[in-house]
Amino acid sequence: MPTPTKRLRATGRVTLSDVAHAAGVSPITVSRALRGERAVAPELVARVQEASTRLGYVPDPAARALASQRSNHVAILIPKLSNTLFVDLLDAAQQTLRAGGFQTLIGVTHYDEAQEEQLLREQLLHRPAGLLITGWNHTASARTLMERSQVPCVHLMDLPRQGEVGPAHCVGFSQNEAGAALTRHLLERGRRRIAFAGAQLDPRVMQRLYGWRSALQEAGLYEPTLEWLNPASSSLALGAVMFEQIMGQTPAIDAIFFCNDDLAQGALLAALRLGIQVPARVAIAGFNDLPGSDHMLPSLTTVRTPRAQIGTAGAGMLLALMRGQPPEQSCVDLGFEIVGRHSS
């Protein structure tokens, strides 16, 4: 096996060139092998890894970024890590990016546009190779930062409304149409006084609200008193509280569309405790088809959203952009599915 003949630099730090010489390959092959790129033959990867371990080589991401004008990491900004929705998306995106030789640097915005802008400034200081960001609602300064950085960017979860933003890349589905479709499902089941219960009130929740509102307006059944909005974080406990509040309204509500499954799950538990029959007395529906919804009593009607597929497809689109390969479609609509269960 080849052995190093050149002396290490004065600092004693092992360099990428040292590893390349020891493994008998080029420095670019070492770089690609250590990034996990699939294009490198397994035999070469093994040689590089053995030489790297033997010499004690530790990659210097800062030096790599300066040399190439970019790093080998991708910045990902999501609203919350405690939400299963974004955990599924993040896991799928990370797997795809890692297979492409990229690491991820995660920022959590907590649904705060100002916090998102600050995180974006911090992330761009590290010269990321690419950016995955949730939604389209950003401050004007954040939009300017993204445009001027020239870092390839893909927006996740939402599709832009016509005229809302300029040319951009995205993977998601129409939150508005999903809200309308679930409302039509309840109307088709004979429901006429359908309340909307929303929490968190982030842009995606508001789009579902607009979809619900437009479907009821088309049916001539919309009333402002059917909207129940609470800016608190979505939870089972809040769902139970909102259910009791809504059921006390006169005239009686015969269906409730909760903006997220955890709220709807809390409502079902409250109905069981109060002895209110679902769906005989009131239908209950949620959104996102979160774990446990199919095991509720009764099982929860909801909208199944493709969050893992969005993570995979969004990361795949970003990989193409980072390689200078424009994707076939700039915006990909992965759709949604109405899952009719026993609660409606």
Image (cartoon, grey):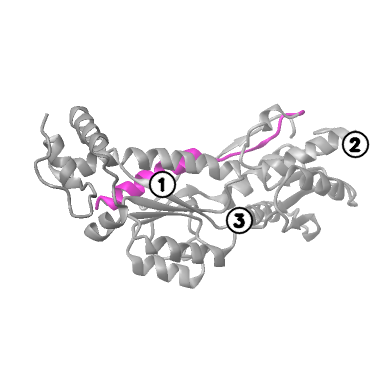
The first of marks 3 and 1 along the sequence is: 3
Q: Quadrant of the C terminus?
A: top right
Secondary element under disc 3, as helix, strand or loop, is helix
302 inside magenta stretch: yes
Mark 2, Cα crowd under 10 Å, few <14 / some 14-19 / many 20+, is: few
Mark 1, Cα crowd under 10 Å, few <14 / some 14-19 / many 20+, is: many
The Cα–Cα distance between marks 2 and 3, rounded to whole angstroms, is 31 Å
The Cα–Cα distance between marks 3 and 1, rounded to whole angstroms, is 21 Å
Q: Nearer the viewer, residue 318 or 47?
A: 47
The Cα–Cα distance between marks 2 and 1, rounded to whole angstroms, is 44 Å
Q: Which residues are magenta?
A: 297-324
**Horizontal side of residue 80 vs 3, given as left or right:** right
The first of marks 2 and 3 along the sequence is: 3
Q: Which mark is residue 274?
A: 2
Q: Nearer the viewer, residue 232 or 34?
A: 34
Which residue is denoted by mark 3 in the rendering? 207
